[in-house]
Image (cartoon, coloured by chain):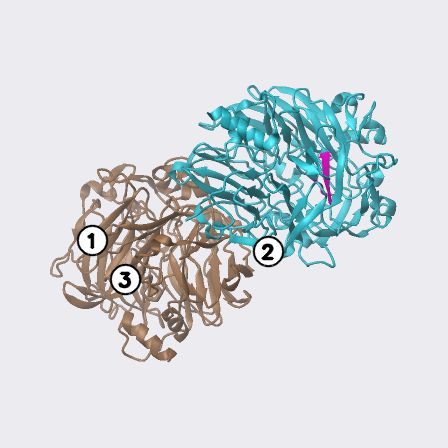
Chain colours: A brown, B cyan
């Protein structure tokens, strides 16, 4: 009976027609809407819940059920997990993990506090955030700031294994969650602002032994592409597809980091993610397309070998780091049923690709203010097929080093950064937390020293001009047509992950600290509540003893909140974010609190 | 019309019959139950509110209205203030002050962050707490950890004046609020565990100039007593009443600190407070009564001269620091109307005195477990009149240094520490947060070095034996008869200040983090809510736009929570508190959050 419910659930969201061979436990656990087992809700990264007790009509009555201070300040990204009667809560550095007893008002069952050298803190580019835990096979997986991957016994918090994925002394750190899939735990790495050659790595779920590692940039055997079989826009990538797009050995310090979210299609056995910006931010130091930075990857989870790649921003000139989540869905694209991968990139374009083949279906601006490009060439017969046309005026490479290119939209933190969008299979619509921020960008020559910042640009960010005056929008997006359906302005960037539910509501948080619920039809605000601190966490939901709860971590920080989180006051500090978000201090102070809501 | 309302209010609570000559502003502001102007609610320290919108019947519907993270962890004592549409919130070290706009979901109007040398932190005996702000004449008064007293413009947070009350390098620090009265601001000082000769000091409210200073121990001209006119138990204290009860110059490092709460009777023009323990904790080093440590003082606020004194624990042998609040009330004592001062001492005795004369009316145990004394001699004809009879077995002085006196009840942190009780004029009953904790106490010889700890005893604290197994009770006390009316057991000490209201409810918080409302008749629990962290703050209430709110700071710490707050794990650390409260870590983590409640 359980099995049929599971299959039914899978059918509903993934059109699986063959026997399930992937990690049965994760599939089983994520198919149960009473739980929240992965940060992304499910393998498809849809952040959709079938729970409907809390709905469009009664959400206005939502009240705080209980609260929990994590004991840590600074930016709280990610969300708690719920498995059975236990909630698992993580914190920013030092990455404490709490197991809380839902039967007992959140009493602490166990606490795990890793010992990490605090020297990792200044090596983390944009606050000491962590995007949370994952659960599989009775284990809680934590990927620490210092890149240690830990498997904990979910029952008692005891370490089962540990693996060291990188070296903070070389600028390698972590802020991301992990993808537990089949018998592996797959993890990424940060360090694009320190010249790290980034990669994804699969560890054996039971032992922590390294199984495979695929770099984003480098020789074919490092990036795990098959020159003949790995496809890009319908053609094999060919030999040395990455290194021939770099000058000399620059690829060795070439970035392409992997600190975003990973989705997975059990039927195709492919994982999807975006690689980040090439290093340095000064384009003059790295002529070429800098492949495969800024790329959506589809890799076989067993071997790591890429099935296809698509580079969104060849030769990045603006730090349009491509790590945002890739949401898998089955929707109509221009009238035709498609298995798609949808990605809202920092560069301001919303992409829809065929996730089987990597075919580019849609690439449209999801904020009309985007001005660095006139759009992407969609005609396969054109030489520029799949590439964005860059507007000279906003080309920091054309303007050259030590020239301040003004008024580029979006800013480096993108029309959207890492906080994940939600997709509702019920409406077929994507709900996307966005930035509405532009920038001035001045590249300069920078030398590489291992473990030292390797940025090479001075930035200043500010609200997009000639619009509503705010710095963010929460939007509804038709990924089949590449169109904004509605847009709800917010005074600050929406830096929180969204959640859509079968109760006909969409939730998100704001940097001032509000949890909001809106109508998926038109974005009308149905509920708001001021949590203790600014929200950069992701909304999740679960049931306990038959009652639905909604939970959110508040704790201002992240790139947008780095000024408050790290006490920075110079407007150009925080890689340019501080000035734009300086007035956040009028709304909120540091915090680290879980707030759990329910109906009365 | 305002004036008549004011006079009516005063008549109701203080029987004032003569024209009000004291600080009109504070009297006016505290008479308005919509506000919360002093930490203690009013000059009488009653912590009673006439608001009754939230009442016994509907309190079960209370829900969280909004929340605010202070951006600081560790112990949050005291409460916010509300004046008009503005809420003022303080934090532990570094003692940030926020002015929050109640018209705008608590948006930050201004923030004041003093610059203090963090070297003050290890000089604070029992966490970096601060018991909050006071308001008078358009000014917010803050007394910082480093003993700087600051007057801020309530409108914009600008400094009006600053005064330095002590020197942390000599062990002088502050955790207390201040008493704004007439044209003065009266402040105390901490440092009993550092051999400070402690005092109360009055500063000019408009300029910050020192007006008078009265020490607790020392020569008559320092302690501001009139040998002929200052009374003790009906007799003048006589010449050198303090120094003749000390051996040699020990009084110069004699403690008697003043970090508690100050009450004030406008009609009598007297302020009331308790002085703390004599230094050191090793009684062998300071034979004598150690006057006037451990004493309730009634001082004229204009001159500082004492009208009367009453020493509760002559020659302290247990650190029964006498600083707890002195609550003024007009009640029947053994059938007769009396103007009384009521004090629940650390030593486990609840005292009722005539606040005009200092006559001792009642002295009874407010926890039956108290065993160090058989009681106080109440017969004025006896030589021991007014003194407690000490049980030899529990006399750490008789047992001598380097002997571990076991099973003393209460523990050093008393049957009650600083968190204030509430008095309801409606019921005539006191509601008292208590400890139910005993100790082993081993004094040892200690040498004095300025600025170094001068404790001289090793302690271990644990739940009182042979009782409900918990470490606290919330009790109702008849101060006229000296009787417990009811007692509600709690798993941990109740380390939160109580609030009684005209809505027939009494509120308090718990160390696990619950805000609770109980029935004043029988202590029956009417409401509870789990706030983000353990509560050591004091409950307050106010109205905004006609709606009643209840607010509480959570943030585990203080003496009971010092283990969590300072990361101590050795059971005997934290002056003996850590072991007893070690299991708090199973309930809560550090925090610093204001939670504001209202009816739906």
Q: Which residue is mark 3?
A: A424
For marks 3 and 2, give the CA distance. 40 Å
Q: Residue B517, image x and y in percent?
A: 54, 50
At x 47%, y 26%, the residue is B2
**Under tag 1, what secondary structure?**
strand
**Under tag 2, what secondary structure?**
helix
Residue placed most toward the observer, A223 or A144: A144
User: Mark 2 — on which chain does it sit?
Assistant: B
For marks 2 and 1, give the CA distance. 48 Å
The magenta stretch is B344-353
The reply to whether discs 3 and 2 touch (Cβ–Cβ < 8 Å) is no
A195 over B153 or under it: above or below: below
Earlier-in-chain disc, 3 versus 1? 3
- The answer as to whether the residues below labels 3 and 1 share one chain is yes
**Apparent side of residue A16 relative to residue B448 in the rendered image (left or right):** left
Q: Which residue is mark 1?
A: A485
């Amino acid at each position: 009976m359980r099995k049929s419910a599971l299959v039914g659930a899978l059918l509903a969201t993934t059109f699986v027609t063959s026997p399930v061979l992937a990690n049965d436990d994760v599939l089983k656990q994520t198919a149960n809407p009473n739980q929240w087992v992965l940060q992304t809700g499910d393998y498809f990264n849809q952040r959709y819940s079938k729970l409907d007790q809390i709905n469009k009509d009664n959400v206005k009555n939502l009240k705080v059920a209980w609260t929990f201070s994590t004991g840590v300040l600074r930016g709280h990204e990610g969300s708690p997990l719920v498995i059975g009667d236990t909630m698992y809560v993580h914190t920013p550095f030092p990455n404490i993990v709490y197991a809380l007893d839902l039967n007992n008002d959140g009493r602490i069952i166990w606490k795990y506090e890793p010992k990490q050298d605090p020297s990792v803190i200044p090596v983390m580019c944009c606050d000491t955030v962590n995007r949370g835990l994952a659960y599989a096979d009775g284990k809680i997986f934590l990927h620490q700031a210092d890149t240690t991957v830990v498997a904990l016994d979910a029952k008692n918090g005891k370490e089962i294994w540990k693996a060291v994925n990188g070296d903070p002394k070389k600028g390698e750190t972590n802020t991301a969650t992990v993808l537990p899939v089949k018998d592996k735990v797959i993890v990424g790495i940060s360090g694009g602002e320190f010249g790290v050659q980034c990669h994804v790595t699969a560890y054996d779920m039971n032992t922590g032994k390294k199984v495979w590692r695929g770099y984003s940039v480098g020789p074919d055997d490092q990036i795990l592409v098959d020159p003949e079989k790995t496809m890009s826009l319908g053609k094999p990538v060919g030999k040395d597809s990455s290194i021939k797009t770099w000058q000399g050995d620059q690829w060795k310090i070439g970035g392409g980091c992997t600190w975003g979210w990973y989705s997975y299609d059990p039927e195709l056995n492919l994982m999807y993610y975006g690689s980040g910006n090439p290093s340095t931010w000064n384009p003059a130091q790295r002529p070429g397309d800098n492949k495969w930075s800024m790329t959506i990857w589809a890799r076989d989870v067993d071997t790591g070998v890429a099935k296809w790649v698509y580079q969104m921003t060849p030769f990045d000139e603006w730090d349009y780091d491509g790590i945002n989540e890739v949401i898998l869905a089955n929707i109509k694209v221009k009238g035709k049923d498609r298995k798609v991968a949808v990605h809202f990139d920092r560069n301001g374009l919303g992409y829809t690709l065929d996730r089987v083949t990597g075919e580019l279906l849609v690439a449209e601006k999801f904020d009309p203010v985007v001005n660095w490009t006139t759009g992407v060439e969609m005609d396969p017969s054109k030489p520029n097929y799949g590439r964005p046309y860059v507007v000279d005026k906003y080309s920091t490479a054309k303007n050259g080093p030590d020239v301040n290119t003004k008024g580029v939209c979006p800013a480096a933190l993108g029309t959207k950064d890492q906080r994940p969008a939600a997709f509702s299979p019920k409406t077929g619509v994507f709900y996307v937390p966005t930035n509405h921020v532009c920038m001035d960008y001045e590249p300069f020559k920078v030398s590489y020293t291992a473990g030292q910042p390797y940025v090479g640009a001075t930035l200043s960010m500010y609200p997009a001009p000639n619009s509503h005056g705010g710095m963010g929008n929460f939007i509804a997006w038709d990924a089949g047509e590449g169109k904004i359906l509605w847009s709800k302005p917010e005074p600050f960037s929406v830096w929180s992950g969204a959640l859509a539910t079968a109760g006909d509501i969409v939730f998100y948080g704001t940097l001032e600290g509000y949890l909001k619920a809106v109508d998926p039809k038109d974005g009308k605000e149905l509920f708001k509540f001021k949590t203790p601190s600014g929200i950069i966490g992701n909304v999740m939901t679960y049931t306990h003893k038959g009652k639905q709860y909604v939970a959110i971590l508040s704790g201002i920080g992240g790139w947008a909140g780095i000024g408050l989180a790290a006490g920075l006051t110079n407007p150009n500090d925080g890689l340019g974010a501080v000035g734009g978000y300086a007035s956040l201090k009028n709304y909120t102070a540091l915090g680290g609190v879980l707030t759990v809501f329910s109906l009365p």
